[in-house]
Image: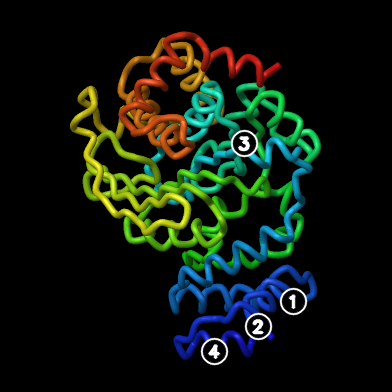
Amino acid sequence: MLNSLFKKLSLGADLSASEIILAVDELTNEKVPAPLKADFLVELARKGESPAEIAGFASELRNRALPLPLSAETRAGDILDVCGTGGDQLGTFNISTTVALVAASAGVTVAKHGNRAITSKAGSADVLEALGIPVGLTPEEAAASLEKNQFAFLFAPNYHPAFKHIGPARKLCAERGQRTIFNVLGPLLNPARPTCQLIGVPRPELCEPMATVLQSLGVRRGMVVSGQIGTAHLDELSTLGPTEIAEFYQDRAFARSTFSPEDFPLQKATLDDLKGGDREANAMIIRRLLAGEDRGPKRDAVLLNAGAALFVAGRTRSIAEGWELATTQIDSGAALQKLKTLAG
């Protein structure tokens, strides 16, 4: 089946919804050779994945994930996820993970979906583990944590067992230096099915397609950002340059904008000021930030992105208002207390 789909892709044609289901069947089938899967993924990337294809793959793969037994009350409210696709190669500390903790301290229910390091020294799972926060929660434990603590980390490999049959093909693609659709799928596969999402991407041209995908997956409020740092782009809002944004609320049309941080009280900084290290180093950075001990450029990055996350979650009416709320959560000790509570 992958051979016939490969031929269609080679002609520049997009896959239909039914063909995407067949492709996922083949990609997750351990009997299909990894080189054949890799060839298919490379050809799909060469053609260029359409928003409909990305949404189709995300929907089908998410349907195969282990579900969370959330209560009706939790499902009736909003659930936020904030993460980047990774791949910007800039070596910043775990900004999104810090933001997730700040948002949870402000009463937002946060289901953080992530993995260990792939393109960085410390992934979200690595740094949370170093902070003492459980990262191997079962679906039942994660649901209970969301309801009790407004936070749970969902370790991707535990919720997507079929991925183990895709891994060898992805490794072959990586050895060829070839990106695949899986480079953007991660933030779209959260088994908690968040209603609000802030996603960072390393290329500004991905903002609108990814926002289109979020909307088609049923997300009520979404924002996709790509921040500029010199000639490079960060999968976060940037404190060092403008940020391209694509956002939507429910079924309303997209709003495209270029966000400038000039109106915020930012300190002079360079990329080096936002650099992180290994899991232990990044855990220490997060502890100092949440304790209010680090008040430098890293704090600015957290406040700006937390401001956006709180706005997306509906807790504030603007990013600027979100910045102020995030400041209050840190300076009052609430953010640090949330960390202590989650670490047990």
Instruction: Using the image, tell me which numbered label, if any, was put on residue 168.
Output: none
Disc 3 and disc 1: Cα gap in Å?
A: 30 Å
Q: Quadrant of residue 168?
A: bottom right
Q: Position of residue 257 (x, y in %)?
A: 26, 50
Which of the two labelled residues, at mark 3 and mark 2, occupies the earlier sequence position?
2
Q: How crowded is mark 1: few (under 14 residues within 10 Å), some or many (20 or more)?
A: some
Q: Say what amino acid the circle numbered 3 marks.
A: Ala
Q: Say what amino acid the circle numbered 4 marks.
A: Lys
User: Circle 3 sits on which residue?
Assistant: 125
Q: Where is residue 160 in the image (x, y as percent from the top left)?
A: 72, 54
Q: Residue at x 53, y 66 (%)?
A: 54
Q: Position of residue 70 (x, y in %)?
A: 75, 40
Instruction: Using the image, tell me which numbered label, if any, was put on residue 2.
Output: 2
Which of the two labelled residues, at mark 2 and mark 4, occupies the earlier sequence position?
2
Q: Which residue is drawn at 59% across and 34% down?
A: 110
Q: Position of residue 318 (x, y in %)?
A: 34, 33
Which of the two labelled residues, at mark 3 and mark 1, occupies the earlier sequence position?
1
Q: Residue at x 61, y 77 (%)?
A: 17
Disc 2 and disc 4: Cα gap in Å?
A: 10 Å
Contact, mark 2 vs mark 1 (Cβ under 8 Å): yes
User: Circle 4 sits on which residue?
Assistant: 8
Q: Say what amino acid the circle numbered 1 marks.
A: Val
Q: Nearer the viewer, mark 4 or mark 3?
A: 4
Q: Quadrant of residue 295?
A: top left
Q: Residues within 10 Å of mark 2 (few under 14, many from 20)?
A: many
Which quadrant is the N terminus positioned in? bottom right
User: Circle 1 sits on which residue?
Assistant: 32
Disc 4 and disc 1: Cα gap in Å?
A: 19 Å
What SS does tag 3 mark?
Answer: helix
